[in-house]
Amino acid sequence: MANGSSVVGIGLQYGDEGKIKAFDRVAASAKVWVRFNGGPNAGHNLKVGDVHLITHGVPSGFIRDGVLGYIGSGTVINPEKMNAEIAYIAAHRFNLNNRLFISANASLIQPSHILLDRISGDEVGTTGNGIGPAYADQALRQLGSLLKNIRVGDYLANPDANQMQVQMNLEDVMNRYADLMQKKKVSDINLSALVNTFDKQTRRLAPYLCDNPFFVEEYIQQGHDVFFEGANAVGLDVILGTVPYVTSSRTIAAAAYTGGD
């Protein structure tokens, strides 16, 4: 059996190029659509008949019958927003059960990341989704005894212990940046509510967890075509874009083969 093909679609400007309409044409034969970068900062417009949807993290191929979606390790995931998006898509008659798979190695956007983005992201420009701080903590890994980068699979393997890590990370940001929080007049932080909601929402992702790093490769070897759906655009690449006014991930085509697994 001949291997399937893999095609990468990216924007060549700064986003909002109308990528998805073009992607839908070039990816007509794809069995799997893969997201490999970014998080809920993307906004992809889909129109199927009289149904209009805007998606942020879920790969757009679900509008075609039988197409699977895979969210790769190069992405960062806000559990509450991901669950809301899945429900939103289901409300428009597209069921993602057994069709959506999330890499166990994708990093979680924690409440600490969203808070840090809220109090420090104005100058560089941010969507306020905590994406930059989440990618920063991927590189930081650990700060003293604090595990800063927590992946989906790691959290779900031991949610009780990791819930405590998430709480400590939020406490650390609140203590470390207390002066900045006061300057920005941010005082509405309910620590226990944020951590409990995060825990509940992350646990809800368990049915979509994929701990097979060869998920995409196996479909290609079975003869299926795969499409890598780029978010943002080349002009926003964290290294090659108009730094510092860029996104926090790699947006070039080569990133598909690392972040898309």
Image (cartoon, helix red, strand yellow):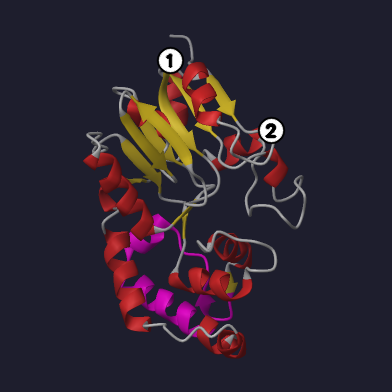
Identify the residue position indicated by label 2 in the image. Answer: 12
Q: Quadrant of the image for the N terminus?
A: top left
Which residue lies at the image location 31% right of the left edge and 78% below the top edge?
193
Q: Is residue 151 above or below residue 253?
A: below
Query: Which portion, as a residue range, is magenta?
Result: 143-172
Q: Which residue of the protein is positioned furthest toward the front in this rendering?
A: 50
Which residue lies at the image location 69% right of the left edge and 33% below the top edge?
12
Mark 2 and mark 1: span between their CA atoms?
29 Å
* Residue 166 falls inside the magenta stretch: yes
Tell me the quarter of the picture where residue 49 sits: top left
Disc 1 secondary structure class: loop
The amino acid type, in three-letter code, at marker 1 is Gly
The mark found on residue 223 in the picture is 1
Counting from the top left corner in percent of width and height, residue 68 is at 35, 30
Q: Is residue 165 left or right of residue 235?
A: left
Label 2–label 1 contact, CB within 8 A? no
Which residue lies at the image location 38% right of the left edge and 34% below the top edge?
69
Tell me the quarter of the picture where residue 181 sits: bottom right
* Residue 13 falls inside the magenta stretch: no
Can residue 159 be seen by looking at this rendering? no
The amino acid type, in three-letter code, at marker 2 is Leu
Counting from the top left corner in percent of width and height, residue 176 is at 59, 86
Disc 2 secondary structure class: loop
Counting from the top left corner in percent of width and height, residue 139 is at 63, 62
Which residue lies at the image location 49% right of the left edge and 44% below the top edge?
43
Q: 53 or 140: which is nearer to us?
A: 53
